[in-house]
Image (tube, rainbow, N blue to C red):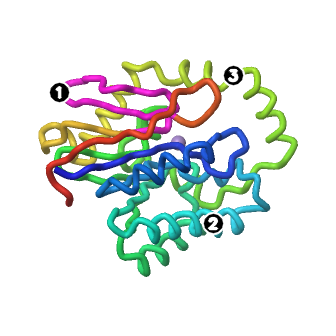
């Protein structure tokens, strides 16, 4: 059996994320895991507090390269989410993966034995793979949002609006229905041997919910008022 740690929606460099509070736990997990999955929206290019996309790419690549370097016994995998499906980041990831033996990335998913890791954008709007690709393409050249807009969002965030919005936008049953439909579309459903799905995106934690023979997990997000957990699991195969 191999040990896998999965973390989603860190939203690094977004002021509203407390991602830095979890760095020690992430190090501890990486020290004992065989595989560490960043499950999308690891980096927030839309709400970055750094000067822009370039500086954010640089900081994100430095962070990932540093982790992979410090834990050579662990394999790192980066799935993209909507917030980090950004062309300049993709270009830099290609280069990082080329020179980093224990790091891989994929825009959409990672399958390991009976377990599938996906970001989960299709929970917000029903999307098959073709529709998800169209949606993601709209993020490729997304610009960092301006300071005024960010301040307005900060104020709404302090009032807890994000908690209400996330829960309203993602009723548990509909979320599972949409994610379930998507994994069938990409050929990684129960008929193809998938029993566990780890996703994120909604920021709403899901602790082993069963839907049509598949078990769904979501570790939440490190935002105020939301639950956040580094999830650890065992798998019987490392593909
Ligand atoms: Mn997302």
**Residue at point 69%, 21% (across, down):** 160
- Across and down, in percent, residue 19 comes to 60, 45
Mark 2–mark 3 distance (CA, rounded to whole Å): 29 Å
Identify the disc placed on residue 57: 2
Choose between 182 and 201: the one closer to the eye. 201
Mark 1 secondary-structure assignment: loop
Answer left or right for 209 relative to 220: left
Locate residue 66, reporting x and y percent: 52, 68
Q: Tell me if mark 1 has few (under 14), some (14-19) or many (20+) residues whose alpha carbon lies within 10 angstroms of its own.
A: few
- The secondary structure type at the circle numbered 2 is helix
| Element assignment for label 3 | helix
Q: Earlier in the sequence, mark 3 or mark 1?
A: 3
Which residue sits at x=42%, y=55%?
Answer: 79
Q: Nearer the viewer, residue 212 or 38?
A: 38
Compared with 239, 145 (above or below) is above
Closest to the observer, 110 or 192: 110
Say few, some or many: other residues with alpha carbon within 10 Å of mark 3 (under 14 / 14 to 19 / 20 or more).
Answer: some
Percent position of residue 151, x then y: 84, 38
The answer as to whether callout 2 falls within 8 Å of ligand 1 is no
Q: Quadrant of residue 175?
A: top left
The mark closer to the camera, 1 or 2, is: 2
The answer to whether residue 214 is magenta is yes
Q: Does residue 99 sit above or below 202 in this rendering?
A: below
Q: Quadrant of residue 75?
A: bottom left
Q: Quadrant of residue 53?
A: bottom right
Q: Which residues are magenta?
A: 199-220
Image position, residue 86 (x, y; %): 58, 60
Mark 1 or 2 closer to N-term?
2
Which numbered disc covers residue 161?
3
Quadrant (top left/top right/bottom left/bottom right) for the C terminus: bottom left
The numbered disc on residue 213 is 1
């Amino acid at each position: 059996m191999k040990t896998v740690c999965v973390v989603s929606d860190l939203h690094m460099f977004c002021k509203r994320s407390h991602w830095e509070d979890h760095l020690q736990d992430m190090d501890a997990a990486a020290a004992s895991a065989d595989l560490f999955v960043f499950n999308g929206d690891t980096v927030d290019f839309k709400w970055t507090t750094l000067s822009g996309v370039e500086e954010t790419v640089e900081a994100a690549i430095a962070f990932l390269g540093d982790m992979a370097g410090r834990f050579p016994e662990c394999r790192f995998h980066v799935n993209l989410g909507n917030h980090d499906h950004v062309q300049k980041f993709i270009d830099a990831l290609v280069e990082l993966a080329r020179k980093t033996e224990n790091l891989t990335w994929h825009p959409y998913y990672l399958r390991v034995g009976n377990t599938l890791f996906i970001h989960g954008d299709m929970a917000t709007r029903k999307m098959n793979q073709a529709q998800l690709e169209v949606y993601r393409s709209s993020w490729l050249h997304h610009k960092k949002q301006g300071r005024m807009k960010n301040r307005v969002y900060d104020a709404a965030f302090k009032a807890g609006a994000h908690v209400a919005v996330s829960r309203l936008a993602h009723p548990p049953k509909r979320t599972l229905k949409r994610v379930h439909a998507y994994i069938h579309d990409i050929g990684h459903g129960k008929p193809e041997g998938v029993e566990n799905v780890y996703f994120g995106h909604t920021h709403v934690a899901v602790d082993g919910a069963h839907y049509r023979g598949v078990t769904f997990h979501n570790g939440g997000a490190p935002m105020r008022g939301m639950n956040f957990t580094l999830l650890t699991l065992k798998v019987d195969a490392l593909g």
